[in-house]
Amino acid sequence: MAFISSRGWLLYSGDAEAHLDIARRMVDSRTPGYDQVGTAWLPLEHWLTVPFAGVDAWWQSGLAGAIPSALCFVVAGCFLFAAARRIFQSAAAGWTATVLVALNPNLLYLQSTAMTEAVFYACLAALLYFTVRFRESQGWPSVIGAGLAACAGTLTRYEGWFLLPCAAVYFLWVARRRVVVAVVFCLIAGLGPLFWLAHNWWLGGDPLAFYRGPYSARAIQGAASFPGRDDWSKAVLFFRTAAELCCGTGLVLVALGGLAAALFKRVFWPLVLLALPGAFYVWSVHSGAVPIFVPSLWFGSYYNTRYGLAVLPFLALAAAGLVAATPPGRVRVAIAMLVIAAGSAHWLSHPRPEDWIVWQESNINDRARREAVSEAAEYLGAHYVRGSGIFTSFGGAVTPIYRELGIPLRDTFTGDNGLAWDAASARPELVLRETWGVALAGDAAEAAMLRAGCYSLEKSIFVKGAREIRIYRRTGENRDSP
């Protein structure tokens, strides 16, 4: 995290910026509180970030989002080690799986940002540990632990929902009191999806707003076609390519060898569980929910490349199977070191950030947005007087302006302010009183300021590849004001 922070990369990704600002709005807004979490992104990562986002310096630097991710990364490593050691009855195998994950620079980058991957990794590793432990202990603490881990996963990423039926079947298969145990697990784990359905109904009037609402991934993607949509072979090809670029060719090759050894040792459930997130993304690409673009295929562009990391724990555990297949003692330790070296060889031979595809996606795709934000912050910082108020769009394209300047979000009047925003949008000539306005060209905030009739355009910021940002200043009385 120190390496990423020292280079100013904590908020390179627009999604990381948005996650951080959602958490900040929960404690700093004209209407702070629970509702600010929204309906599209699952809430756990935002809730974990809230205590840190309230610290102005940590919010401005992006450290507020990095702290919970880094802590979850450590927790995930501990659970993965404990699970792998129990699965293979070998500490060397446990260390192998854990180190192979921990040395991956793409995941190291994400765990230093306000992204959800490290949080979900912790939930997945905990679920793996407790399910493996239950097979041996048949104890209720393992059932409860698995249920809580699965519940947390469903509140972090949607592939967490995909795990629940398989985990329930697992408990039905291995538990002595099959039905009772499976029901208890489902009652605990199912609280996450049930809560989110109720949350979406409460805030959006539709329990499936996260799936079909205006801010859902499906709505953003629309009807646009992309490779893999309704084509299983291309969906597998794009995910497989992203996985190899994210995890490294060396790890993929070592894992193929270790997979045979792990299956020979009858390590079935752990491999199935860790393979499920990857299967979820193949299905998502095929169904048209999300595309994956990698520079080596078709368009030469980057998009959602980080989804390839979904199989990183699976590959690491499979690779550890090679270690477990060797005799205990010095030979096993030597093999563990060789497996780690081979699995990490790709990154040792490609040490530059430009070779880390997830970082490169953030660097390239969000460069124009960062430049536009920086230019807007420079202008507004030289003219804005604290407390005079800003009527503004909201989201990752403009909120970073206020974060960079340290302007409290309660100084801004945005779409997350509910009924007040609705009134300002409907009758700006009667409601708007803010001295400044910052909008994206053609959006609802700009339309409201133009209808108010008292704002003049002071600065237009256009950077190729980013939406134009327009800064307005109030120069007179509202049209039709009494």
Image (cartoon, helix red, strand yellow):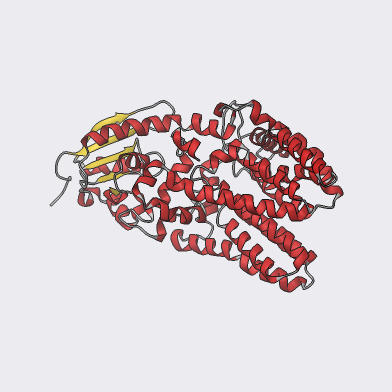
Judging depth in this view, the residue of 368 and 256 nearest the camera is 256
Q: How many marks?
A: 0
Left-right relation of 248 to 430: right
Residue 53 screen position, x and y as percent: 40, 51
In this rendered view, identify the residue nearer to me: 58 or 167.
Answer: 58
Q: Residue at x 57, y 35 (%)?
A: 358
- Residue projecting furthest to the front: 330
Identify the image quadrant of residue 134.
bottom right
Q: Is residue 469 left or right of residue 432?
A: right
Q: Position of residue 270 (x, y in %)?
A: 75, 53
x, y percent for residue 403: 35, 42
Q: Nearer the viewer, residue 456 or 267?
A: 267
Q: Is residue 292 left or right of residue 366?
A: right
Position of residue 261 measured from the top left corner of the image (x, y, whole percent)? 84, 44
Q: Determine the residue positioned at 57% across, 26% down.
A: 352
> Would residue 388 be visible to someone looking at this image?
yes
